[in-house]
Structure formats: C-alpha cells, structure tokens
Amino acid sequence: MDNDLGALELLKTVQNFGVPRIEHLLPSIWFYRYGINLAMEHYQTSELKILDVGCSKGYGVYIMKLICPTCHFVGVDLNGDDIKTAKELLSDFQDIVCLSGDITNEHFVEYLLSTYGPFDVITCFEVYEHIKPETADTFLNNISLLLKQDGLLFISTPNKRIYDTDAYTPDHVNEVSPQQFLRKLEMTGFSPIYIFGSYTKHPFLVRSLEFFNLVARRGNKKNELSLIKKIIRYLLVSVFSPWKVYGEIMKRLSYEKYLQLKFKKAKPVDNYLNSSLILVVASKSAVP
C-alpha cells in the first residue's frame, strides 16, 4: 500500500481490531499517518525503529506498518489483554513486537533500551492524560531516554479547557493546557517543531458554555446539568457547531457518512489553542 493511503481508508482497515465506537480513532488515524510519513521524509529512509507507547490493540502499529513495510516496530501497553489481541492481529507481519509493560518502570525501560532501542521515532497518542501527575515527569523522561538524540516524538493529549466543555472522562487524571504540556516537554529536553489541533471549537461557544456553567466537566468532577441547562446547551451548540447536531442525526441514518463527516472535522489544523486535542511534533535536541 502506498504512502498516500487515505486516512479514511486506513480507518476502515482497523475496524477488525475490536475497538468500540470506532469514530474515536479518527484523530489518531490522522496522527499516525502524518507521523510515519513525516518521519520517513525527515530521515530520508524507510528503515526506522519506531516505538508506539500506549499501543492498545495495535491498530496504530498496523497503520504505520502499512505505510512503511520496512520499518521496525515495538508497541507497548499496560493492558495485557490488549497486547494479547495485538499479537494475534499482527502475527502475519515481520518486524513487529508487542509488549505489556509500564514506561514509568525503570527496569522495563532498561529492557526496551538494551533490547530494541534507542528508537528513531516514538509515537504516544492520548496516553499522557492517563498518567498520574506525580509520575508524569518520569514518563516523559523515560520516553526521552528511549529516543535517539535528534529523534522525533509525536505526542498528543486533550486540551483541558476545550475538551472538558464536551466530555467527562473519569480516567483522565492528568489533563493540562497546551501551555503546560509544552512547558513539560521543553523541561524534558524536547524542542517542539510543529503543534496542531483536532476538533476545533468556536471561541464564543467555549466562553458561553463556561459562563453559563454548561460544560461537561468542572475540575475533576462531572458537571450535572438540569433539563433547562441541557436545552440551553443544545441551542448554543446548534448555532455555533451545527455539524455536531447534524452528525448525531447522520449517525443514526448512515454510520458511514457520519464517519466521513467526523473524519473531516478531526483533520489536524494550526489552531490548537481552540482544539479539543493537541498534537506536538518535537525533537530530542538537548539534555534536560
């Protein structure tokens, strides 16, 4: 399959990976596709060693392997059941290793480094928000240890303010602002090269939802809305993000067309400050 493999076509190929609500993979499909293509262009080679942190059932490794058949991949995840599934689904591919382990564990990192690393590229999409704040520095430091000098890191996480207007996700224990996230990366010795956003929201809608206390999450708690507040929220969203209302209708009529609509909205853009997700491309270029 060629390097111009479309993101939506890639999404269709991973629907057998047992991921519920497949539409939630759309940003990651864009990120994996963009990341592997940029890495090959950056290094001017298709012989790369790539580590995918938080690989889940292996769909990201699968996507990158389709685009770069000669690249070597290691996927790691805490969930042993997911790793078992990944091994089964990726068993026909060479140069793919999937391991259950914790990137915050010093011994596991030493094993990865001595056995497979250091890596040219590390991908880590929507994992940071699941890492407890007290171990976040260790997490990023260990990623740095596993990456070659001048290697590339592709990492994404929710933009707390924007993301929380729509969603309350209980296992997100470490949501941060873009500024906080970039500061953490720089303190770890990474130099951001590109910053993108996914699912951009109208600034006035965000301010209105905050002003009227219509957001989904306040701090670390779910914001329970009364019926009247739910109606007000629906009206605001209908005016400033009509695609969301249309999308919910389309989801019931044609899931395929719904995916196409959401796929378009998930495409990375420059306006990361008003986006629900942020993607950072960074280079390991200094010792922290």
Image (cartoon, rainbow, N blue to C red):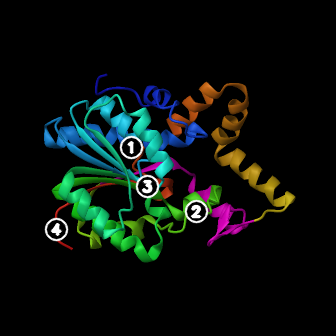
**Location of residue 226 by image quarter:** bottom right
Tell me whether circle 2 and circle 3 mark residues in contact (CB < 8 Å).
no
Q: Is residue 214 magenta?
A: yes
User: Based on the displayed image, in which of its 4 quarters is residue 40 positioned?
Assistant: top left
The residues tagged by marks 1 and 4 sit, at their Cα atoms, a distance apart of 24 Å
Mark 4 → mark 3, Cα distance in angstroms:
23 Å
**Which label's residue is closer to the chain start, 2 or 3?**
2
2 or 3: mark nearer the eye: 2
Residue 174: within the magenta? no
Percent position of residue 25, x then y: 50, 41
Q: Identify whether 240 is placed above or below 113.
A: above
Q: Nearer the viewer, mark 1 or mark 2?
A: 2
Residue 144: give x, y in percent of width and height: 25, 64
Residue toward you, 242 or 14 = 14
Residue type, numbered disc 3? Ile
Q: Which residue is mark 1?
A: 31
Label 3 and label 1: CA atoms lie apart by 10 Å
Instruction: Indicate which disc residue 278 carries.
Output: 3
- Which residues lie in the magenta part? 194-223
Q: Quick one: SS at disc 3?
A: strand
Q: Nearer the viewer, residue 62 or 276?
A: 62
Rate crowding at label 2 as few (under 14), some (14 to 19) or many (20 or more) other CA atoms within 10 Å. Answer: few
Question: What mark, if any, has residue 171 been given in the picture?
Answer: 2
Q: Earlier in the sequence, mark 1 or mark 4?
A: 1
User: Is 93 displayed left or right of 41 in the figure?
Assistant: right
Q: Which residue is mark 4?
A: 286
Indicate the quadrant where residue 45 lies.
top left
Quadrant assignment for the C terminus: bottom left
